[in-house]
């Protein structure tokens, strides 16, 4: 996982949580083992390394599915 902190705003966990939204956002930013973030990181790696023929276009499509917001440390 990358060291940059970010939040996946359209994550089902965030969207379904009716508790204090700012607390949930902070928890998401600090979470590094989330399956959605793992998918995001794999897609970013594929785009960065361009290891597979035509896979970068698919990885970009995957990333566009997520509403990702960088979080200041």
Image (tube, helix red, strand yellow):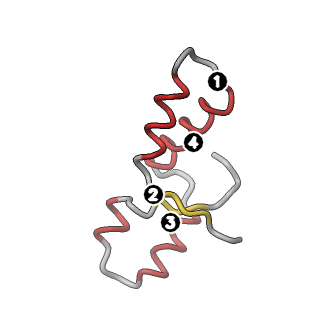
**Mark 1 touching mark 2, by CB under 8 A?**
no
Q: CA distance from mark 1 to mark 2?
A: 23 Å
From the top left corner, tell me how far across and down residue 18 is, in percent. Answer: 30, 79
- Between disc 2 and disc 3, the foreground one is 2
Residue beneath the point at 57% across and 54% down: 32
Return the residue found at the far bottom: 20
Q: Earlier in the sequence, mark 4 or mark 3?
A: 3
Dot 4: what SS? helix
58 versus 62 height, above or below: above
The nearer-to-camera label among 4 and 3 is: 4
Q: Residues within 10 Å of mark 3 (few under 14, many from 20)?
A: many
Q: How many marks?
A: 4
Quickly name the residue at label 4. 41
- Reply above or below: 13 against 52: below
Counting residues from the start of the chain, the first of labels 1 and 2 encountered is 1
Residue holding disc 3: 28
Q: Are marks 2 and 3 in contact (CB under 8 Å)?
A: no
- Cβ–Cβ under 8 Å for marks 4 and 2: no
Q: What's the residue at 59%, 39% (across, down)?
A: 44
Q: What is the secondary structure assignment of the residue under circle 2?
A: loop
Classify 10 Å Cα crowding around label 1: few (below 14), some (14-19), many (20 and above): some
The quadrant of the rendering that contains the N terminus is top right
- Residue 33, above or below 48: below
Q: Which mark is residue 50?
A: 1
Residues at marks 1 and 4 touching, judged by CB atoms closer than 8 Å: no
The alpha-carbon separation of the residues under discs 2 and 3 comes to 13 Å
- In primary-sequence order, the first of circles 1 and 4 is 4
């Amino acid at each position: 996982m990358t060291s940059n902190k970010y939040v996946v705003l359209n994550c089902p966990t965030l969207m379904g949580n009716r508790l204090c939204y700012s607390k949930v956002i902070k928890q998401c930013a600090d979470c590094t083992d989330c399956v959605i973030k793992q998918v995001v990181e794999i897609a970013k790696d594929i785009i960065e390394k361009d290891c597979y023929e035509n896979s970068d276009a698919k990885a970009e499509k995957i990333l566009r599915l997520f509403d990702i917001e960088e979080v200041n440390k």
